[in-house]
């Protein structure tokens, strides 16, 4: 692959299953806030493909985006490399596509690697066990390059990360702080990464992220999150009242059966085709009719009503269509 890379660009490489995009944005915002020109490469996008490549928070011009092709992600990666070189970024924060070991982004030589929480996703490619998936993610660990990881990793994943770091003679940093809030936990990991880089996250430096517990409507409150696998959905549900109504849909390649079980106890409106905006709109209309209606009553007890909150999750495609409907 012919490419131009600024000789003194410092690379930060991030892999994991959940929280990669959030962690990347935290790190990039911290670096920009500290005065460094910072490139950011993430995926997937929510509303516009230009979200995937940015410098200091400004997306790449749309005309620079390559046409769809068989190896489109690799083509985007080449564009990102060229763009960051032209912009002469000081740092480039890079999110892997899938896995890490075999990902095209793994050609960089980072000064720091980060592995966020590893869970079950892309099992058709990465393997059916946490250990197999972790081996792919740990593939970004380079010889004598420090590595930061989430302290809440599954034991099997942590074992793989520790063993890989040891074999590469790479210092492993594990934050001691743990939060029940998934976004705060991602921030803890990002802050540890920035600490190693000698940077603090300035107050207010991180803008709201698209489709991450994003409120798109009031009265009723409609909250959208792109959580699209078991661990991510389980985590975000801790922030949703049990009397809320959930609009839920997933791609057919995802573990639907396990994820739908997490919604036991909620009133759920299903979306079969998350790419069909008409079906998404119909599901939202159904959910809004349920707001304020009784959902449980027992003899001798007061009737309990659904709270005026609708939560949308299960797919980034579903989240994007909801945001388009509300022009968010």
Image: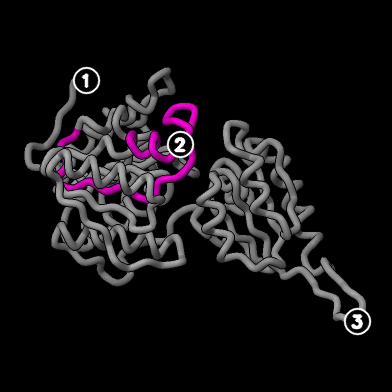
Res. 75 visible in picture: yes
Q: Quadrant of the N terminus?
A: top left
**Badge 2: residue crowd in 10 Å (few <14, some 14–19, many ≥20):** some
Q: Residue 1's mark? A: 1
* Residue on which the image places disc 2: 129
Residue range corresponding to the magenta coloring: 108-136
Res. 324 visible in picture: no
Q: Residue 303's mark? A: none
Q: Nearer the viewer, residue 258 or 79?
A: 258
* Residue on which the image places disc 3: 300
Residue 73 x/y as whole percent: 37, 28
Q: Is residue 99 above or below residue 283?
A: above
Residue at coordinates 83% horizontally, 68% vertically from top-left? 296
Marks 3 & 1, CB-CB < 8 Å contact: no
| Local secondary structure at mark 3 | loop
Q: Nearer the viewer, residue 117 or 207?
A: 117
């Amino acid at each position: 692959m012919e490419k131009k890379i600024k000789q003194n660009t410092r690379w930060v490489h991030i892999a994991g299953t959940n929280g990669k995009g959030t962690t990347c944005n935290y790190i990039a915002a911290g670096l920009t806030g500290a005065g460094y020109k910072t490139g950011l490469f993430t995926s997937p996008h929510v509303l516009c493909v230009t979200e995937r490549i940015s410098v200091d928070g400004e997306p790449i011009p749309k005309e620079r985006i390559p046409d769809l092709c068989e190896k489109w992600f690799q083509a985007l990666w080449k564009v990102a490399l060229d763009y960051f070189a032209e912009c002469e970024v000081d740092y480039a924060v890079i999110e892997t596509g899938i896995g890490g070991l075999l990902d095209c982004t793994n050609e960089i030589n980072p000064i720091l690697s980060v592995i966020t929480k590893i869970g079950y996703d892309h099992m058709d490619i990465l393997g059916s066990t946490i250990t197999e998936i972790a081996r792919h993610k740990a593939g970004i660990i380079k010889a004598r390059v420090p590595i930061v990881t989430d302290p809440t990793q599954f034991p099997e994943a942590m074992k793989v990360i520790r063993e890989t770091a040891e074999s590469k003679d790479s210092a492993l940093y594990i934050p001691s702080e743990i939060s029940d809030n998934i976004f705060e936990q991602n921030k803890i990991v990002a802050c540890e990464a920035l600490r190693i880089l000698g940077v603090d996250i300035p107050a207010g430096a991180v803008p709201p992220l698209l489709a991450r517990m994003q409120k798109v409507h009031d009265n009723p409150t409609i909250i959208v999150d792109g959580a699209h696998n078991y661990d991510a959905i389980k985590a975000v549900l801790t922030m949703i009242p049990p009397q809320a109504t959930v609009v839920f849909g997933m791609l057919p390649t995802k573990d639907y059966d396990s994820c739908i079980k997490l919604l036991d106890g909620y009133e759920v409106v299903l979306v079969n085709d998350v790419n069909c905006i008409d079906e998404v709109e119909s599901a939202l209309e159904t959910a809004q009719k349920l707001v304020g209606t009784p959902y449980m009553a027992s003899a001798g007890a007061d009737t309990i009503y659904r709270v005026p909150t609708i939560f949308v999750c299960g797919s980034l495609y579903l989240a994007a269509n909801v945001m388009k409907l509300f022009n968010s």
